[in-house]
Image: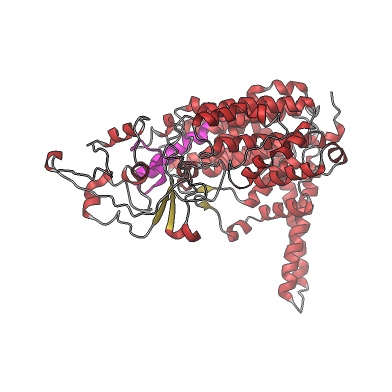
Amino acid sequence: THGKKSPWGEHEIDYVLFATVPSKDVLTIKPHPDEVDDIKWVTQSKLLEMFDDKSLLFSPWFRLIANRWMIGSTSEEGRGGGWWDDLNRTMSTDDFCDFDTIYRFDPPEEHMGGGGDAGPMFEKEDIAAVVGDASKKQGAYGKVKTHKESKLKQILHLEEVMSAVTLLYVHPLKSNLKSDNIQKTFDSSDLAFCDEILCKVSRSFAAVIRQLPPTLLVDVLIFYLVLRALDTVEDDMTYFPSNDEKVKALLSFHKTALVDPKWTMVGCGEGDERRLLEEFPKCHSVYAALPEASRRVICDITQRMGTGMAEFVDKDLGQGTVDITQYNRYCHFVAGLVGEGLSRLFAVSGLEQSSLATELHLSDQMGLFLQKTNIIRDYLEDYVDGRAFWPQSVWKKYSSTGDLGYFANPTTDETRLAGLNCLNELVTDALELAPDCLAYLSKLRCAEVFRFCAIPQVMAIATLDKCYYNGDVFTGVVKIRKGMSCLLINNTTDILGVHGIFHRFAKSIMDKAKSARKGGYEDPSCERTMKACQAIIDLTEPEARMAKKQASVVNGTITVVSCAAAGMVLHKPPKNNSVLFSTTMVVASIGMLSFMKMGLTKLMGERSMASLLPASKLTKN
């Protein structure tokens, strides 16, 4: 193994030897008894069956090499199937000979802990590859390639550039953490730590949590940190000496971390997540000062989530979940329960009606929609980590090798199309949750709570559109543009904007499905996909039509102003420092136009926000 966590390791060169014979009887094998315990002639299917047998302890190198290269996949692009799939090619060509790449192998946990930090030596990522890292950290990026558009392409989306300027400088998400009520209620030093660590461990939720009303903000912040700490315990594959010990920690987390003000866990997790656990008493201090009703909710959800996580500790997720039922169950424990907990916190705060706490189905579906989107997007990262979640009952219909990694090397048309078929079915499965997400949002009355819930939802539908029929999912992580993210955030102030976004991306996915079918692509899920998209379109059509009408007026006004500004510059161009002047004019224009667009959109959208009220105008029931 390789890395600071590694309990053991070695550097060596391994040779893989091939021989083809008409019969096994003509080949005599006499391995060194100190190196090889036993040998056996097997078929591909028999070997995979033996891998599933928990009583058999294979060499970690052999298991990883077999799953990665020997059966159905190779590490280099453009190299076809696995070594065993094409023995003639393997024996007669040098296609599979690689004398340059260094691979860091992390063995499975059963081999003295395993789960090191395999990675590039001397930071030279171009000459090293990571294989089988068992130290899964959900949502941790950087392990595989991220597909991004060039800065030039991003700048060409002018509306997104304007949205970015608006969000960053004109109308940013306002933090309410410094409000008098919060500062008087909680220890300032401990609260500052919670705010700091939130920004470190959260990729996207920090800003939307901070904009919540003061009467709810800290409750949700601590709820997130508690669950993140629990998730870190569940993710660490090397800290506990046995699975039984990990299960005990998960089952008792709500009785230790949330009861003992001095409780801490040293050495578990990595980076900021480890720091969160090691300095958890600061979180407990803030948690203890929360209203009793909020603490009851947080404790209950923590207990149930820990129980759910414990259920999956002994399951081998190297090849994903077993079926849709298990897939949904996992998503329920790690995300659906979060949705339920948030609904209950919204209700006890008085900002939302008490009946929202009983919307268990809608709360669960909202969580599943976000979690499934992340699982779809993170296919390759999760597979490399050795802890995947794509359901076998879906992907095995399309993998000719019976291995989830089959799709990671789309070097043939057959593999590429199989991957797209599988991907599209899972995207469709997630899309079918969208109507329930919209139904949940329609029940909210607090503007800040609405935005807190809506922002992740619109990001999810945009990500599904990005993933649909996109082979890049199998070679890296796909992301929506940052400018697009800003545009989506700016349009989540009311149900009108949210419906417009869902309508836009549902139509985009439907158009892709139709175009692909017209081009001869036969997708088994096509009809189901279009049905799911049509359901979203039907629900959002009235608001989408209204939003489009408003956008036309706003954009028309901006166009007129832009043309007038350009005419003034052309009429009397500057004599000196023309480049500087022009640059300044462009920047100033973008800022002015962003401000103008925000004002016009807000003016025209006030009627659609009638059902939402700011927290300051809502009183506790």
Residue 270 location (% of width, % of height): 58, 45
Q: Is residue 91 left or right of residue 66?
A: left
Residue 260 location (% of width, % of height): 71, 30
Q: How many marks?
A: 0
Residue 363 is drawn in which quadrant?
top right
Q: Is residue 106 left or right of residue 89?
A: right
The residue positioned 74% from the left and 45% from the top of the image is 193
The residue positioned 76% from the left and 58% from the top of the image is 591
Image quadrant where one finds the C terminus: top right
Q: Residue furthest left?
A: 26
In reply to whether residue 523 is colored magenta, the answer given is no
The residue lying toward the viewer, choosing from 117 and 145, is 117
Q: Is residue 532 visible?
A: no
The residue lying toward the viewer, choosing from 88 and 451, is 88
The residue positioned 63% from the left and 29% from the top of the image is 253
Answer above or below: position of 411 versus 236: below
Which residues are drawn in magenta? 401-429
Residue 367 is drawn in which quadrant?
top right
The residue positioned 61% from the left and 48% from the top of the image is 271
Residue 36 location (% of width, % of height): 27, 42
The residue lying toward the viewer, choosing from 111 and 464, is 111
